[in-house]
Image: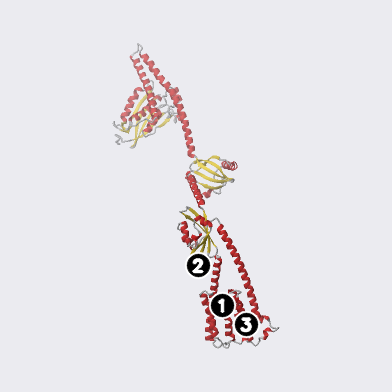
Amino acid sequence: MKSIIQDTKSEGDNVIHFLKTTAIAGLFFSVLMLLYGQIFNSGTASLIADGITVILFGGMLTATIFRRPRLAISMVFLIPFLIYLYYLSELSNAPPPAETISSTLWWLISGTLFLVIFAGLDFRFLLFVISSFATLLFHLSETDRFSSYFSGNQVWTANPLLIYLFTLGLSVALRYILDYQNALYNRNKTSYERRLNETFQSVKQPAAIIEAVRDANGDIIRLIVGKVNHAFESQFRMSMHEINQQELNYIFRYIFRNETNWNDLLIINPRQQTEIYSAHMDRWFTVSFYWLGRETCMVLFSDISRDKSEIRLLQETKRRHLALLEAIPDIFFVIDRDGTYQDIVFKGDASLHMEAGEVIGSTIFDVGFTENMARKIYECIQRAIINDTIETIEYTLQMQEKSLLFEMRLVRLNENSVVSIARDITRRKKAEFELERARIRAEEAVALKSRFLANLSHDIRTPMSIIISLTRMLGEPGLTDYEREEFIQDISQQGNQLLKMIDNTIQLSKIETNAIELNFRFCPVNRLLKELYNQFYPMLPDNRDIRLKTVTDIRHEEAGFETDPEILKEILEELTDNAIRFTEEGLVQVGYRFKNPSSIEFFVEDTGPGIPEEERENIFLRFYVIEKDRRDHKSGSGTGLSIAQHFVALLGGELRLDTKPGKGSRFWFELPLLNPRGFMRIIQ
């Protein structure tokens, strides 16, 4: 009903607006005609008729200004009087009545149409029709051809009465049709509004009808809440009585308690839909706006809090998955059934990074795999899709400077594609290879240690047996002093050899337990070499032509540097003992060479048989003994060179070997020359 009243009000406003426009236009032309007649055509103009015409339109305008449309419409009844003044009165200067009958007809037709449009078929219309016929008859009677309008040979299209009657009938018929259509429209509109109201109340979503109050220019100046449905009252705990006709911005801000500007949503920046959050309810709502005409808007509220919560959980899950994905140093592919790359994420080695566009759209046959490997990957893709299994392939990717090993796993994504995860296993494979080498070395070390223990028992038994035998022979009578001295020397030599084996075993045990402690102090190298010479010279075997020589690059007695003297002496003892043992004849040299202000080189050279090429890597292994030397009873326990190599490394050097089979060997190493003394040379 309110909508019908609003429509009626709107209709009345339109009528007044049209009447005002008509009145202004008529007033303008009537004043213009009055002035024109008095100035340029005063002989035929009628001042009284023109003045009453101005009064007619002025009265109509005044009535519309004061919103009196019925009075404005009733001004049409002055038309017969104006016709009389213009054409029939004694004061008129118009042509004879026979010549002005057509003007009278058009005045009456205009008045009739005006009433049909604005007044309808009411009593005023009937009264005006009667007065119009009377005016026509009176005007016809004033002519000298009155009887001719009713004669049989009169052309009806030239008869004013028939023309007016035809116009009247047509106007009435059109008005009847318009009234019928309007009544039908109103009935349909009423039915539509009733159904709309029923739907509005029965909808499960909270809904509100917003009414727009407009000014004379049609601009919205206020938005008020017209009504709300039951769902709105239940959801927001506000009754219709509390909300009705309240300011929209005020009441909605009170309900949702946020800073949403509802005038902005509906007037300034209108939109179809938006989302709002109510903190005190901890709810998210989707707000939809539906304008039903210019004055009414329906607002629907949808609670999307659960959807928002699920979206937030999904986003958190996505963030966790992305973080997990970022933490995995793998390359991810999506490959379809035909082997075409659909998506890719590069991770891992920076040298592998490339634009996704370079790969996406290519196939596994185009990206660098060999024909056999691409075919194998294709077969794995088919098995993973058909059997829903995880397929694993290892392959090598050759880069510009290195080869990388990868492990590819294929997992079914859907019926047309798989997810491929390629992991760089180069380090793992290298570690496995190194671990395997270490295992082999450990097994070899265990085998060598077993051999060492077996050899050690033999090497210990031999000198012990000699010592026991010689000691027993010393007790026999009749020995000469020379023989006794020789036996004592042999016993001493075998004892020293036995003691050396025990010392090496102890040193090796310290090395394995990292129990070697370094004591750096000043070491006079010339004095050290002299002690070494005095130690080994008496031990030179008489049955071999061997000479021992020390080589000193600096003659100064106090020449030396800071190092661990005991460790350095142990290294030279091991190398010198090894050289004497394997040299049948010739020269064994022990010495040093001043290379530069920062390093000094020590060496032990012999003229022995040398070391075969295939044994050069093995002689530094612990417990390793060349089988030929063992058979010739020249070898020791196989620990001397290993100990010397380790001690050299502790002092900051590296033990190296130069050898030629049949021409001897040279073991040498360089040590840092720390705080040297006496290394000044005079060059002439």
Location of mark 1 (residue): 74
Q: CA distance from mark 2 to mark 3?
A: 47 Å
Query: Which amino acid type is shown beneath numbered disc 2?
Result: Arg
Q: Quadrant of the N terminus?
A: bottom right
Residue drawn at the location 48% of the way across and 38% of the way down = 428
* Residue marked by disc 2: 214
How far across and how far down the image is residue 635, in percent? Answer: 42, 24
Whole-percent x and y of residue 201?
A: 55, 58
Which amino acid type is shown beneath numbered disc 1? Ser
Q: Residues within 10 Å of mark 2 (few under 14, many from 20)?
A: some
Query: Cα distance, mark 1 to mark 2?
Result: 30 Å
Toward the right, the furthest residue is: 152
Residue lying at the far front of the rendered structure: 241
**Residue 104 appears in the figure:** yes
Q: Nearer the viewer, mark 1 or mark 2?
A: 1
Badge 3 element: helix
User: For this rendering, which residue is in front, 263 or 399?
Assistant: 263
Quarter assignment of residue 165: bottom right
Indicate the position of residue 106 as horizontal and vertical percent values: 61, 80
Q: Position of residue 528 (x, y in %)?
A: 32, 29
Q: Earlier in the sequence, mark 1 or mark 2?
A: 1
Q: Residue at x 64, y 73 (%)?
A: 173
Residue positioned 57% across, 59% down in the render: 199
Residue 526 marker: none
What residue does disc 3 label?
134
Quarter of the rendering containing residue 12 = bottom right
